[in-house]
Image (tube, helix red, strand yellow):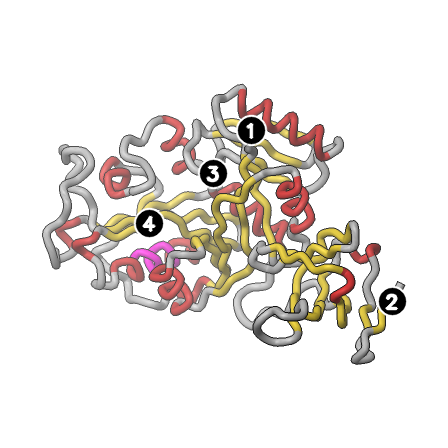
Amino acid sequence: MEFTAAARLKVRLTPADVGKRVSVRAAVPSGAPGSKFTDTVGVLTSWTDGVLLITRRTGESVRIPEDLLVAGKQVPAEPARRRGPSAGFAELARVAARAWQPVESERLGEWELRAAGGFTRRANSVLPLGDPGTGLDDALARVRAWYAARGLPAYVQIATGAAGTQEELGAALAERGWRREVSAEVWTGSLAPVADLTDDDARVRVEHTLGDAWTRRYQRTSEPGPDVLAVLTAGPSVSFATVPVASAPVAAPEPAPRTAPDAAGDVPAAIGRCVVDGRWAGFMAVEVGPAHRRQGLATAVMAALARRALDEGASAAWLQVETDNAPARALYAGMGFSVHHHYHHFRAV
């Protein structure tokens, strides 16, 4: 059906449009402060009992009563990208998964159940790229059981904000009581400009092997066990960048290392990890010690890894950054990266 509002604007939407990207204008309830209308753009994830549920690019869900609709229409599935390499969500999702591999995995239809002893949600969550081969409730019951058998919480990783992402699945998880815990973004950019940010910097060492010094700087875990090392070293072509502390002047007293230094040397001033997979180079674990910040070390690490990736045939770059990490977002935006899509981890409760 088609609703006609008093302003003669039309809502050219029906419940059959669930799953499509829409733009909706709704009247604000009488007596509410602010403007008379609100505008919402996102995926129509449900239309039941007279209420529309629209999921925005960021993953936020907006509920709009049907009787407040003023105007609405379908809009293109994905806005035109202004910069960076062209990429579909499914391609990037698979590339990112290969760059951060679990220790064990199991297929459930087109879903992949992943576990790595609890080290990071990415390696211990379901990657649902398609049909699980069974009803959703049955699939989620199997997911809960699989993770419970390993003493792990059950997580499902879903994405929003690009063509082919999983707004409907996210809404279905929320309706079933799954709680969204962490949201982050996948950014993409061209690789060559990153490599050109600095000249070949002698301070940065790039190797294909993971050294003990690198893990001492890595902040995601204090004692990297077998599962952590397996995740960090797995991938199509993995490189590790290290800036030894002797190569970077200390601007302030360095905090004591988590573990005592050994013959391999002190805690490095900066580190980074890059995985080359076909045309893509993924950047992860770029970290700089507090006493060595504001010296351009993060940029130097990124540039050195980018040059290695170019040598291996990559041309495009991606990385992941949490939505509240303002310094990292500013750094990557200055390098030419921009947001491709958002992703979220839903936990069973």
Q: Which residue is mark 2?
A: 2
Left-right relation of 226 to 57:
left
Gap in angstroms between the C-alphas marked 4 and 1? 26 Å
Q: Which residue is mark 4?
A: 272
Give the crowd class for mark 3: few <14, some 14-19, many >=20 residues within 10 Å: many
Number of the front mark, 2 or 1? 2
Number of the front mark, 4 or 2? 2
- Residue type indicated by callout 2: Glu
Left-right relation of 25 to 276:
right
- Which one is earlier in the sequence, the residue at label 2 or at label 1? 2
Span highlighted in magenta in the image:
301-306
- Residue type indicated by callout 1: Ser
Magenta stretch holds residue 303: yes
Q: What element does badge 4 sit on?
A: strand
Q: Which residue is mark 1?
A: 105
Q: Which residue is mark 3?
A: 121
Gap in angstroms between the C-alphas marked 1 and 3? 14 Å
